[in-house]
Structure formats: C-alpha cells, structure tokens
C-alpha cells in the first residue's frame, strides 16, 4: 500500500514540474529551450534599468540642489545659471 502511494506522489510531482526526471531531458523546459538560458540576460537588463534610473535620479537631484542653493542665496537669474 505504501509503495503505491509513493508512486502516485512521484507521478503527481513529475506532472506538476517538481523534482524528478523529465521526459524531455534534464536541461530542457516544456517549450524546448534549456532552462535558465534567458534568466541571466533578464537579470542584466533589470540591473541596467535600475542603474540608469538611479543615475538619472541623482543627476536630477543635483540640478535641483544647485537651483535651490542659487535661490536661497538671493540671486534672481538662477534658471539661466543651471545647466
């Protein structure tokens, strides 16, 4: 009886994509492409987007800080002096 339950659990796990041997081979997904092939590329793209957004945010905050410093010093032509 215990052996049949174990076999049933193995079959259910295999059907749900869990651990166990897959019929199409150890390194391939259902679509035919190997697993993990595009994962590193997606990670690199996400990191690049986050770095670009951070760079833009820092540049914007620096420009705003220069403008605020100019206004607080009492100057009247602050917009012309900022890049």
Image: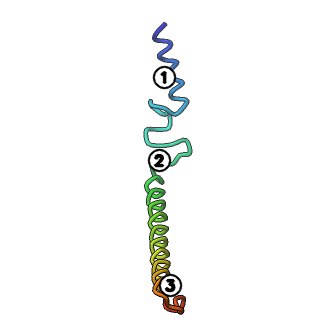
Q: Classify 49 as above or below 1.
A: below
Residue 10 rendering spot, x and y as whole percentages: 48, 23
Q: Classify 41 as above or below 59.
A: above
Q: Which of label 2 and label 3 is nearer to you?
A: 3
| Foreground pick, 56 / 25 | 56
Mark 3 — residue? 71
Q: Which of label 3 and label 1 is nearer to you?
A: 3
User: Cβ–Cβ below 8 Å for labels 3 and 1?
Assistant: no
In this view of the protein, can residue 65 be seen by the observer? yes
Q: At x 50% / y 38%, what residue is drawn?
A: 24
Residue 21 rendering spot, x and y as whole percentages: 45, 31
The scheme the figure's colours follow is rainbow
Q: CA distance from mark 3 to mark 1?
A: 71 Å
Mark 1 — residue? 10
Mark 2 falls on what kind of element? loop
Q: Earlier in the sequence, mark 3 or mark 1?
A: 1
| Foreground pick, 61 / 16 | 61
Q: At x 49% / y 17%, what residue is drawn?
A: 7
């Amino acid at each position: 009886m215990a052996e049949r339950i174990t076999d049933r659990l193995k079959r259910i796990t295999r059907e749900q994509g869990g651990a166990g041997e897959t019929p199409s081979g150890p390194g391939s997904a259902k679509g035919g492409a190997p697993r993990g092939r595009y994962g590193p590329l997606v990670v690199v793209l996400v990191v690049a987007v986050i770095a670009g957004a951070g760079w833009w945010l820092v540049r914007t905050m620096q420009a705003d800080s220069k403008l605020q410093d100019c206004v607080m010093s009492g100057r009247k032509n602050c917009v012309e002096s900022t890049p």
